[in-house]
Image: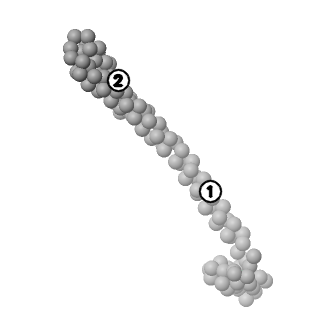
């Protein structure tokens, strides 16, 4: 959780405490409809804290898991390139995208015939 998220959670929590106090005070000495409104506003503070914590968790996951997934993708691409290089029989086959071979190449098969 970032410092900003912690600060926002603290502000929401302070608002929650204040609204809870207002709810109780209004329920005891004021109008019932106002107490209901204060209680509903208290719930909004609870929802705000939960959302802030969820956003912090998602941001943390994105920060710490994305580089690992990117490294796995890079490794897979490198493996594919090495596999292609291992399957290349001659330079002309490589530069002609598998359609032609050097005259001295022992394979002499176009790519569609190669298994
Ligand atoms: Zn070849």
Q: Which of marks 2 and 1 is nearer the N terminus?
A: 2
Residue 15 place in picture, x, y as percent = 29, 23
Q: Name the image quarter holding residue 106.
A: bottom right
Q: Does residue 86 appear to the left or right of 6 in the view shown?
A: right
Disc on res. 75: 1
Q: Does residue 88 appear to the left or right of 37 in the view shown?
A: right
Residue 61 place in picture, x, y as percent = 50, 41
In the rendered image, the vertical position of residue 81 relative to residue 14, given as above or below: below
Disc on res. 113: none
Q: Name the image quarter holding residue 19.
A: top left
Q: Name the image quarter holding residue 28.
A: top left
Q: Secondary structure under badge 2?
A: helix
Q: Secondary structure under badge 1?
A: helix
User: How far apart are the two marked residues, 2 and 1, measured between alpha carbons?
Assistant: 45 Å
Residue 67 place in picture, x, y as percent = 53, 48
One can see residue 22 in this view? no
Residue 32 place in picture, x, y as percent = 24, 18
Q: Pointer 2 and pointer 1: residues touching (CB < 8 Å)?
A: no
In the rendered image, the vertical position of residue 45 relative to residue 57, given as above or below: above
The residue lying at 69 percent from left, 80 percent from top is 111
One can see residue 111 in this view? yes
Q: In which quarter of the image is the N terminus?
A: top left
Instruction: Between residue 40 and residue 95, name the one nearer to us.
Output: 40
Instruction: Between residue 42 and residue 51, name the one nearer to us.
Output: 42
The residue lying at 24 percent from left, 15 percent from top is 26
The residue lying at 65 percent from left, 78 percent from top is 94
Disc on res. 13: 2
């Amino acid at each position: 959780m970032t410092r900003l998220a912690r600060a926002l959670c603290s502000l929401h929590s302070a608002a929650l405490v204040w609204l809870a106090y207002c709810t109780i005070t209004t329920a005891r000495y004021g109008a019932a409809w106002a107490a209901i409104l204060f209680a509903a506003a208290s719930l909004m503070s609870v929802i705000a804290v939960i959302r802030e914590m969820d956003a912090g968790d998602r941001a943390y996951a994105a920060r710490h898991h994305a580089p690992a997934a990117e490294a796995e993708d890079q490794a897979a691409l490198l493996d594919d390139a090495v596999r292609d290089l291992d399957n290349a029989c001659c330079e002309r086959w490589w530069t002609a995208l598998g359609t032609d071979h050097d005259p001295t190449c022992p394979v002499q098969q176009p790519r569609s015939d190669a298994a």
